[in-house]
């Protein structure tokens, strides 16, 4: 009997039983966030690094999540390699982790990665001892370069951040999966559970999403749906789908039919 | 009086060290999950009480926030 425990996801030196990585925003409130993350079964939760907000009363998202989850800080909002590297170093100091979800955005409208800055920042951070998980374009060449630099995973977008359009280029994702030995995690663009299932059916090792759950009408239920979508897609990938055909093939015996 | 920039805002402060600056900014220097950088370089927590704040410094004080 197949068990998720026998199919762990290993990133760098850590092993996880869940293949669902979830963001901690933008939920309606902290309670919904905590319930959604719990329902997701995710073990890795992303957080941002921001200038301190004194009106927040001193409590941070880490006070709510610490201990229960593997916290993955991100460099969201950074437009240059320099800012992304400093944000990662600040995250390491604030959270005491050398893991970083590296994002270097090139454009406010599309939130597409700036590949030039991304590669520069990834190189600097790997040299500085970080476990780098870059949010990147669904481009096999960029992914290969990131792996060559020493990134612990590659996280190509399925579609633009928050767009909910799903996996727009399954062909590229399959190539990226086939060409690299590190985990391939779809990051961004997932809209609903079938998108997540498709990503996993393509062979992805995990799915990272935030808005699809946090902006859903019922985030806790959508977290549950995504969890099942990811698990279903993973099972289907490992089981091996039947080939597509242009003709029918009966599943019932052809012989012994009455009237023949 | 020193003129510095803290989290993107100009400040006139008499803070000799990062530790003093945090107090002046109403940030508890003992609070967890806080990190500080001066002019693009992280100042480890262990140095806050002796790291000087100088005229013209650009300082970032950050903490984790919800994020995707």
Image: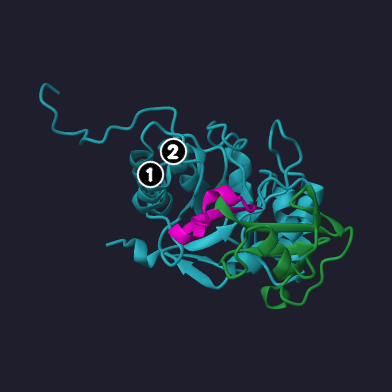
Chain colours: A cyan, B green
Residue A152: percent from the left, percent from the top?
Answer: 63, 64
Q: Which mark is residue A28?
A: 2
Q: Pointer 2 indicates a residue of which chain?
A: A
Whether residue A256 is situated above or below residue A41 in the rendered picture: above
> Are discs 1 and 2 located on one and the same chain?
yes
Name the residue rendered at 84%, 61% in the picture. Answer: B39
Q: Is A20 on the left-hand or right-hand side of A74?
A: left
Q: Is residue A51 magenta?
A: yes
Check contact, mark 1 vs mark 2: CB within 8 A.
Answer: yes
Magenta residues, as a range? A44-64
Report which quarter residue A144 is drawn in: bottom right
Nearer to me, A172 or B67:
B67
Report which quarter residue B46 is drawn in: bottom right
Q: Is B5 on the left-hand or right-hand side of A12?
A: right
* Residue that numbered label 1 is attached to: A32
Q: Judge the density around disc 1: few (<14), some (14-19), many (≥20) Cα neighbours within 10 Å.
A: some
* Residue A202, visible in the rendered structure: no
Residue B47: percent from the left, percent from the top?
Answer: 73, 77
Count of numbered tags: 2
């Amino acid at each position: 009997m197949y068990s998720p425990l026998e199919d762990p996801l290993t990133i760098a030196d850590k092993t996880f039983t869940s293949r669902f990585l979830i963001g901690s925003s933008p939920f309606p409130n902290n309670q919904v966030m905590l319930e959604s993350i719990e329902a997701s079964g995710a073990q890795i939760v992303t957080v941002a690094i921001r200038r301190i907000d004194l009106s927040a009363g001193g409590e941070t998202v880490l006070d709510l999540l610490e201990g229960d989850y593997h916290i993955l800080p991100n460099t969201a909002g950074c437009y240059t390699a320099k800012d992304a590297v400093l944000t990662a170093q600040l995250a390491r100091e604030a959270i005491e982790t050398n893991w970083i979800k590296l994002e270097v955005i090139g454009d406010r409208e599309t939130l597409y990665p700036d590949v030039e800055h991304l590669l520069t920042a990834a190189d600097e951070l790997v040299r500085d001892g970080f476990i780098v998980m870059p949010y990147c374009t669904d481009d096999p060449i960029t992914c290969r370069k990131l792996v060559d630099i020493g990134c612990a995973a590659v996280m190509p977008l399925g579609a633009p951040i928050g767009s909910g359009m799903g996996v727009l280029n399954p062909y590229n994702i399959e190539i990226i999966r086939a060409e690299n030995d590190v985990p391939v995690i779809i990051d961004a663009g997932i809209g609903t559970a079938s998108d997540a299932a498709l990503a996993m059916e393509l062979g992805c090792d995990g799915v990272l999403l935030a808005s699809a759950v946090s902006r859903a009408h019922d985030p806790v239920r959508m977290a549950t749906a995504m969890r099942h979508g990811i698990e279903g897609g993973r099972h289907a990938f490992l089981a091996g789908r039947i080939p597509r055909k242009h003709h029918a093939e009966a599943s019932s015996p052809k012989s012994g039919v009455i009237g023949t | 009086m020193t003129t510095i920039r803290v989290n993107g805002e100009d400040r006139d402060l008499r803070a000799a060290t990062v530790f003093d600056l945090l107090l002046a900014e109403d940030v508890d220097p003992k609070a967890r999950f806080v990190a500080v950088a001066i002019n693009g370089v992280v100042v480890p927590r262990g140095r806050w009480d002796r790291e000087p704040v100088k005229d013209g410094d650009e300082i970032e004080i950050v903490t984790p926030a919800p994020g995707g």
